[in-house]
């Protein structure tokens, strides 16, 4: 790659300048993962050595296997596919027409194929993976399949790569569970390089604050559905990723910081010359980093303990999605690395909040990009010793590559180091002058279990809530109570249970945000406690989410009764049910998850096996074992009761 960098720049963490907490977390992560990571790398290295010896992977196939592998290829490609000279590159795409973020991928395969050929390789579209839109399924039965789709995507990625035809892969995905699923699948083929190819955000539409206000007015009955739909259409208006800083854009930040995007490619808008140039460059780079070249960068080596810590730091520094407290654990496990919530909790205390993007501010990701974006963020975090520089990336050795921004000069793609700081301190600040001293995502502990809370958008007066519980076994029950006026004029903690991965797939409960925000604005003291999710769009209502153990696994949340006092203290990091221990011990669980017979419709019955094997939230809420170790991360066994899984 043609990267222009400052040759006089001192390596920020090559001489012991790492932040002590980052160093400590990294060291214990390496030690904790030593056995599993060693086993993972041993398998990776064996496969890499075999790849170097045999040449392109398809050369190991028998004649009938190989003929099947390119029978449908263009006649112009067949001579190269049978010649065993050009490395093969798999294109794995999550394209569909419904996700605005993924719609641009419709045109990518021919662009990538041409770029790969020009670089000396040959690309085939190896497979598609499902990509559901959480925005469409919010509050509906389909949302109960959303988290499970991550595992389906990982398995679909593995199927696409299982033909042993490929020496590298190009991964096309942006949103929510799609990028974690693609990466988990790719890491199970860790000897293959994987270049992730973003599509970029849509241009800014209706400001997010105006959109949120209209949602609250609709919840209060002050505007109708037509006005609400007009507002939503002005916000979500064209191809590209939604512009608020939710899970999709958090994915993109982490993937660039992990060194799996080309530098500066994350937030370039679709349908621009620069976007297409970066896409072509991604195809070329996939060829350059195969085992048959001088810059071999297998994804299993790129994603190591230091890269995982870098992703955690970037997530916290940007106030990113709480969903990644699970996805990062699952991604790390696929690379043989055992990440714990304790690691995230310690990092959160040390990593300052450097960005304000909705829902943590009024700006969107386009404003962040205009302020300097990833290059300013990464450069500042490197200089502060909060990111590891000594990592392998698809751009080369060292995260310093990611100080460089991409641009077009006379039609040619070039990279140059960005040396100036933020252009808008209301959106992006340096470590020396952060928005807050910590990352805004915290872990809570107490007699109700362990939970996650995102406080970067919560006002100080709402950081501690002590109020009676109002218990619901379904989010629709709370919505009905709100509409009936039954929640008016009261302080309360809404407890929404049986929403965990083993109960119903751990749906996002984002539809609860507008009505709860209405009550908060009326002066009521309210909060949420749930074993479900609230998504990357979690906002100003304090919400203890991902509570583990979940109700369906016998967690204490199943013992909570209406009127029980609950204290959610995000300052002290505690979550307590203020009921005497003896009284709690005498209680039996209340409520129950849906049975197998009830959990049907919208295809949910096809996912019963996932309910029965899903692990707890703090272990990634997945079904796969820690790579390099035999036992599953789920570890909880089936829950009690008919169909509780």
Image (cartoon, grey):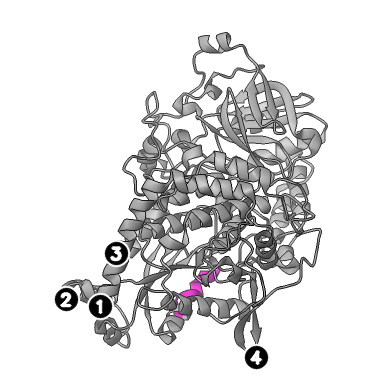
x and y, in percent, of residue 192 in the image: 37, 66
- As for residue 261 lying within the magenta part, the answer is no
- As for residue 106 lying within the magenta part, the answer is yes
Q: Secondary structure at mark 4?
A: loop
Question: In the rendered structure, which disc, 4 or 1, sits on the residue that comes first in sequence?
Answer: 1
> How far apart are the two marked residues, 4 and 1, measured between alpha carbons?
40 Å
Residue for badge 4: 410
> How far apart are the two marked residues, 3 and 2, measured between alpha carbons?
22 Å
Residue for badge 2: 63
The structure residue drawn at horizontal position 43% and vertical position 62%, both measured from the top left corner, is 301
The structure residue drawn at horizontal position 68% and vertical position 28%, both measured from the top left corner, is 568
Q: Secondary structure at mark 1?
A: loop
Quadrant location, the C terminus: top left
Residue for badge 1: 71
Question: In the rendered structure, which disc, 4 or 3, sits on the residue that comes first in sequence?
Answer: 3
| Magenta segment boundaries in residue numbering | 104-110
| Mark 2 Cα shell of 10 Å, populated few (<14), some (14-19), many (≥20) | few
Q: Between residues 239 and 318, which one lies in front from this camera angle?
A: 318
Residue 384 occupies which quadrant of the picture?
bottom right
Q: Is residue 77 visible?
A: yes
Tell me if residue 644 comes above or below residue 331 in the rendering: above
x and y, in percent, of residue 204 in the image: 72, 65
Tell me if residue 333 comes above or below residue 428 in the rendering: above
x and y, in percent, of residue 549 in the image: 50, 29
| Mark 1 Cα shell of 10 Å, populated few (<14), some (14-19), many (≥20) | few
The structure residue drawn at horizontal position 57% and vertical position 55%, both measured from the top left corner, is 311
Residue for badge 3: 47
Query: As drawn, is 450 to the left or to the right of 171?
Result: right
Question: In the rendered structure, which disc, 1 or 2, sits on the residue that comes first in sequence?
Answer: 2
């Amino acid at each position: 790659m043609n990267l222009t960098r400052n040759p006089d720049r001192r390596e920020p963490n090559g001489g012991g300048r790492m932040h002590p907490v980052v160093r400590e977390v990294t060291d214990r992560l390496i030690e904790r993962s030593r056995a599993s990571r060693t086993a993972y790398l041993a398998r990776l290295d064996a496969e890499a050595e075999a790849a170097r010896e045999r040449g392109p992977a398809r050369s190991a196939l028998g004649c009938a296997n190989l003929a099947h592998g390119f029978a449908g290829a263009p006649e112009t490609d067949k001579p190269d596919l049978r010649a065993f000279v050009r490395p093969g590159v798999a294109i794995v795409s999550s394209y569909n027409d419904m996700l605005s973020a993924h719609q641009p991928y419709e045109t990518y395969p021919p662009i990538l194929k041409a770029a790969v050929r020009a670089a000396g390789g040959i690309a085939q579209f190896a497979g598609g993976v499902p990509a559901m839109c959480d925005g469409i399924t919010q509050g509906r039965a389909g949302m109960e399949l959303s988290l499970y789709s991550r595992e389906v995507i990982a398995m679909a990625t593995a199927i696409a790569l299982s033909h042993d035809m490929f020496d590298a892969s190009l991964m096309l995905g942006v949103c929510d569970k799609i990028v974690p699923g693609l990466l988990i699948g790719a890491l199970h083929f860790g000897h293959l390089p994987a270049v992730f190819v973003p599509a970029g955000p849509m241009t800014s539409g209706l400001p997010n604050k105006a959109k949120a206000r209209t949602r609250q007015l609709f919840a209060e009955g002050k505007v109708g559905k037509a006005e609400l739909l007009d507002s939503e259409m002005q916000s979500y208006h064209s191809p590209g990723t939604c512009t608020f800083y939710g899970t999709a854009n958090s994915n993109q930040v982490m993937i660039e910081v992990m060194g799996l995007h080309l530098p500066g490619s994350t937030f370039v808008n679709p349908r621009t010359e620069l976007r297409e140039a970066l896409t072509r460059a991604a195809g070329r780079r996939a060829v350059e980093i195969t085992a048959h070249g001088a810059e071999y960068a297998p994804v299993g080596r790129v994603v190591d303990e230091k890269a995982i810590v870098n992703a955690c730091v970037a997530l916290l520094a940007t106030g990113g999605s709480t969903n990644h407290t699970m996805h990062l654990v699952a991604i790390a496990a696929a690379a043989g690395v055992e990440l714990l919530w304790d690691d995230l909790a310690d990092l959160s205390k040390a990593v300052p909040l450097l960005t304000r993007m909705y829902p943590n501010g009024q700006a969107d990701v386009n404003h962040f990009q205009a302020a300097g974006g990833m290059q300013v963020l990464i450069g500042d975090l490197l200089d502060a010793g909060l990111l590891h520089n000594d990592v392998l990336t698809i751009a080369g050795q060292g995260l310093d590559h990611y100080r460089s921004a991409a641009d077009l000069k006379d039609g040619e793609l070039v990279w140059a180091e960005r040396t100036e700081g933020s252009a808008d301190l209301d959106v992006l600040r340096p470590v020396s002058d952060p928005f807050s001293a910590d990352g805004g995502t915290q872990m809570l502990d107490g007699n109700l279990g362990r939970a996650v809370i995102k406080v970067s958008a919560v006002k100080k007066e709402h950081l501690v809530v002590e109020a009676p519980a109002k218990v619901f076994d379904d989010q629709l029950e709370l919505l009905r109570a709100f509409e009936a006026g039954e929640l008016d004029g009261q302080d309360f903690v809404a407890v929404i249970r049986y929403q965990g991965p083993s109960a119903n797939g751990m749906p996002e409960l984002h539809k609860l945000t507008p009505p709860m925000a209405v009550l908060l604005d009326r002066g009521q003291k309210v909060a949420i406690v749930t074993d479900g999710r609230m998504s990357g769009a979690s906002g100003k209502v304090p919400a203890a989410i991902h509570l583990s153990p979940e109700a369906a696994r016998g967690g204490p949340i199943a013992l909570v009764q209406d009127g029980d006092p609950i204290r959610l203290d995000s300052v002290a990091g505690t979550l307590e049910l203020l009921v005497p221990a003896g009284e709690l011990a005498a209680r039996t669980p209340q409520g129950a998850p849906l049975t197998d017979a009830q959990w049907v419709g919208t295809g949910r019955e096809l996912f019963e096996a996932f309910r029965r094997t899903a692990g707890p939230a703090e272990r990634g809420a997945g079904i796969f074992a820690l790579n390099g170790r035999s036992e599953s991360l789920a570890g909880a066994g089936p829950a009690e009761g008919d169909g509780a899984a």
